[in-house]
Image (cartoon, rainbow, N blue to C red):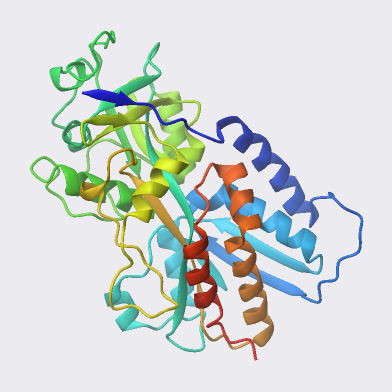
Amino acid sequence: MKISRIARIGAIGAVAALALAGCAANEGGSGSSDAPSDSTLSGSLDATGASSQEAAQQSWVAAFQTANPDVTVNYTATGSGTGRENFIAGSSNFIGSDRAFNTDELATGGFGSCASDEIVEIPVYISPVAVAFNLEGIDELNLDGKTLAGIFAGTITKWNDPAIADQNEGVDLPDQAIVPVHRADASGTQETFTKYLSAVAPDVWTYEAADEWPLSSGEAGDGTSGVVDAITNGSGYIGFADASRTSELGQVAVEVEGEYVAYSAEAAAALVEASPLEEGRSDHDLAYAVDPAAAPAGSYPIALVSYLIGCVEYDDAETAGLVKAYFEYVASAEGQDAAAEAAGSAPISDTLREQINTAIDAIVTE
């Protein structure tokens, strides 16, 4: 098989950008300019949700608060599942989620944060989900979907198993136990990964795609940080997480159309751009139907499409105006570039931005 190495981006810059963004967010501005702001916005927003978005959210919040010094945006990375629960309960003005609400959830409605059951879902954070490992002296491995499914299903248990060795000629693989790590919490990142396994290796991974892990084996980590910490501190460990958080770990290049593709923002974007929007949704509900089994050559097949979710109608017009303005900034070229620098995500295309802005316009501010 041929090997394709698509360069990973944002590995070092993401750490520095995250630190700067965090300081700026805490100070209510980036300190980049002393010029007075022309913003008339004021008030605060409380949001929870996807931990995959954390670095991007810190950069977005810092820049938005700099441009709007009388606004405070509080984003807490609780995980996507908790974020969706909070949105239903009415305790978050908007949320980040690594999946859109499914059609059954939309039919049920009852979003406590909203004045109606109409919601806005926009895909603004596209990022590869990296498969990362910790093996002394080994920085990269080539693995196909069937092998990854066997590792996480518990049928491939040693690093020197022939299924791994045959794809990594010349690599000195140890006779060491494999410890797969998954998320302890309900996670869109986890659903993205299990969707990949079930799509490309259904004979090995016999479970449906789900945000909760279906097995009792392996080790569980709380949130993205918990998974990354477990892999970092455990020799022989392997897991999956948003790529922006795994740059210090060994990386898996994943087989696609006879080539091994390392993760990159560009390769993840190629998968998403080849995917259609889900049918039967409104113009302000932009959910992608990503099929990892149909990944085109050169694309990375495990790509996270993460959403901002808000209401079409809020009880409070001020809240509606703040959410709308924040969403517009996040979707802007400036906002997407900030996320790319901080988290290595793939900026959305101009065509998708037009669709997203149409969706945002549905938010009622009067």
- The answer to which quarter of the image holds residue 320 is bottom right
Left or right, 328 with reference to 80: right
Q: Residue at x 64, y 64 (%)?
A: 329
Query: Where 185 falls versus 168 (above or below)?
Result: below
Residue 189 picture location, percent across and down:
38, 50
What count of labels does the image hold?
0
Left or right, 322 with reference to 298: right
* The residue positioned farthest toward the front in the image shown: 351
Identify the image quadrant of the C terminus. Answer: bottom right
- The answer to which quarter of the image holds residue 152 is top left
* The residue positioned farthest toward the left in the image shown: 203
Residue 164 picture location, percent across and down:
20, 21
Left or right, 232 with reference to 153: right
Query: Where 140 falls versus 84 (above or below)?
Result: above
| Res 185 seen here | no
Identify the image quadrant of the N terminus. Answer: top left
Left or right, 229 with reference to 12: left
Query: Where 181 falls versus 349 (above or below)?
Result: above
Q: Residue at x 36, y 38 (%)?
A: 240
- 117 or 1: nearer the viewer: 1
- 48 or 307: nearer the viewer: 307
Residue 360 picture location, percent across and down:
54, 76
| Res 271 seen here | yes
